[in-house]
């Protein structure tokens, strides 16, 4: 694929998946009574509010990057653990939802030049965001999900190791172990989404 065309497709697809993910965190936090995301201008799908330039660049260079984390204050939640659980799940689940929508569009536009390619890339990015972020290693969303599900004592012990999470994540990434975890999960998620969507068409 032409390099320019590749970037013209990958950049907007990546920005859409990333912005939708971060907006969803802020939206659920806001609905649960936390004004912090709104006060910080994060209740928007405008990518400028969510993109970290260095994090976006790293995604293209080493295929690992980050967006600006949505600030929340869990003490606003009536139930702190449930609030953290819902907010943390909102990001990955929003990508699953967007993957569903994209997969439906692929049924109709997959053979349309450029459009079909863009939808395929957008679909793959959403699978990546959904699966990668649910891994229970700090600072990923999955670590907050795990914390919220653990009993109080175990949750406290788990939080003490949060500072080492980024080191562990980098080791998983550069050792290639992360691919061993993500590949079957992405394939499984793709299979579920495709089966649900293509079943009415007698495909899959």
Image (spheres, rainbow, N blue to C red):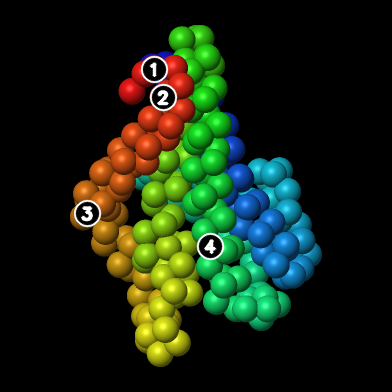
Mark 1 or 3: in front is 1
> Residue placed at 41% from the left, 24% from the top?
199
Q: Measure the alpha-carbon separation of dots 1 and 3.
A: 37 Å
Q: Which residue is mark 4?
A: 88
* SS label for mark 1: loop
Can you give x and y, in whole percent of width and height, for residue 180 in the image? 22, 49
Left or right relative to 58: residue 39:
right
Q: Measure the alpha-carbon separation of dots 2 and 3.
A: 33 Å
Q: Residues within 10 Å of mark 2 (few under 14, many from 20)?
A: few
Q: Nearer the viewer, residue 26 or 65?
A: 26
- Disc with the residue nearer the chain's start (4 vs 2): 4
- Disc with the residue nearer the chain's start (1 vs 3): 3
CB under 8 Å between discs 1 and 3: no
Whether residue 204 is visible, yes or no, is yes
CB under 8 Å between discs 2 and 3: no
> Residue placed at 72% from the left, 63% from the top?
30
Q: Measure the alpha-carbon separation of dots 1 and 2.
A: 5 Å
Name of the residue lying farthest toward the bottom: 153
Q: Which residue is mark 1?
A: 202
Can you give x and y, in whole percent of width and height, for residue 182 in the image? 30, 48
> Residue placed at 69% from the left, 56% from the top?
27
Q: Can you tell which mark lies on residue 177?
A: 3
> Residue placed at 30% from the left, 67% from the top?
168
- Disc with the residue nearer the chain's start (2 vs 3): 3
The quarter of the image holding the C terminus is top left
Q: Which residue is mark 2?
A: 199
């Amino acid at each position: 694929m032409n390099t320019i065309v590749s970037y013209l497709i990958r950049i907007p697809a990546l920005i859409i998946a990333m912005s939708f993910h971060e907006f969803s965190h802020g939206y659920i936090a806001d609905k649960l009574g936390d004004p912090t995301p709104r006060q910080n201008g994060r209740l928007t799908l405008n990518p400028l509010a969510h993109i970290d330039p260095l994090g976006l660049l790293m995604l293209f260079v080493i295929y690992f990057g980050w967006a600006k984390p949505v600030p929340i204050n869990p003490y606003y939640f009536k139930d702190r653990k449930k609030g953290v659980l819902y907010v943390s799940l909102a990001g990955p689940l929003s990508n699953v939802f967007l993957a569903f929508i994209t997969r439906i569009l692929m049924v109709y536009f997959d053979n349309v030049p450029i459009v079909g390619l863009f939808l395929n890339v957008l679909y793959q990015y959403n699978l990546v965001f959904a699966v990668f972020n649910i891994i229970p290693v700090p600072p990923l969303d999955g670590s907050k999900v795990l914390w919220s599900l653990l009993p109080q004592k175990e949750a406290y012990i788990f939080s003490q190791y949060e500072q080492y999470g980024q080191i562990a994540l980098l080791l998983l990434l550069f050792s290639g172990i992360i691919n061993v975890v993500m590949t079957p999960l992405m394939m499984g998620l793709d299979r579920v989404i495709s089966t649900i969507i293509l079943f009415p068409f007698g495909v899959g």
